[in-house]
Amino acid sequence: MTTLVEKLGKLVAETRGRYMNPDPARPLEVGTFGRVSNGVMHPAGRLDRWFRAVGVEGMALERKPSNITEASTLASIGVRETTLSLSGTSQAGAFGNAKVGLEITFTAKDQFYFHVPGLRFVGIEDMWRIGEKLVELARRDSHDPQFWEDDWCVVTGIYEVPSMLRVLSQEAGEKVALTAAGAGTVDALYEIGADFGFVSQNNSSVVLRETYRATTSNCVAFYEMHKVHWDIFGNKWWKSTTDLNP
């Protein structure tokens, strides 16, 4: 049976061209490689360490400087946000005397909402030179110690954020109300590191709602991957992938 997290990962891959990290608190670095099953990376190692282990020289792995890429929210088309006034309500006291909140309405089946303030993309320097090297190694005999497996995928970019929340609804018409501790304005809801509380929801059996906060490093919300592709004529090339089972 497909879990809500698996369904959420599939929706993100199909509509946003990236993979969702099932556990955003799990460390995930650019250069991690492994096999992907049902949209989830199963790491086998780090590319720079693999190069050293098999004697491939001159292939250093460097992170590009990070940069903010998107607004505070990432949601399916049709998901609606409505500002709530919590002043004087019993709901407000449960969440640090917050005065405002947001109500998220899912207008169709299988929709998602991410709150990711300060989301940054981090890539790999010289990614195409690295890809050319992997294509060269993938053309070698499989008994060669430097042979690169065709079905290995490489994490070539990560989207990291200090704190985040994510909500998935499987049914149309579901509503989830949330607020942040002490928030007195809508802008305060989007401060990095806000402690979010969920005020209400219609049906917990069809709604996933989770919050994450980084401890020692940032949460990794999403990631991108490249791999060596090939065709029936034996041609091989380096290209991004969003397949659930590449």
Image (tube, rainbow, N blue to C red):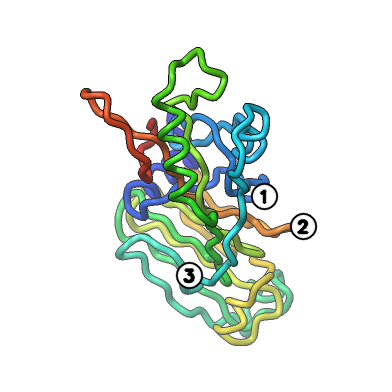
Q: For the residue labelled by badge 3, is the local secondary structure a helix, a strand or a loop?
A: loop
Residue labelled with disc 1: 25
> If the image is split into quadrants, where does the C terminus sit?
top left
Nearest to viewer (mark 3 / mark 1)? 3
The residues bearing labels 2 and 1 have C-alpha atoms spaced at a distance of 8 Å
Q: For the residue labelled by badge 1, is the local secondary structure a helix, a strand or a loop?
A: loop
Q: Are marks 3 and 2 in contact (CB under 8 Å)?
A: no
Tell me: residue 127, above or below residue 163: above
Residue labelled with disc 3: 69
Residue labelled with disc 2: 215
Q: Residue furthest top?
A: 143
Of labels 3 and 2, earlier in sequence is 3
Nearest to viewer (mark 3 / mark 2)? 3
Residue 93, percent across and down? Answer: 71, 75
Q: Are marks 3 and 1 in contact (CB under 8 Å)?
A: no
Of labels 3 and 1, earlier in sequence is 1
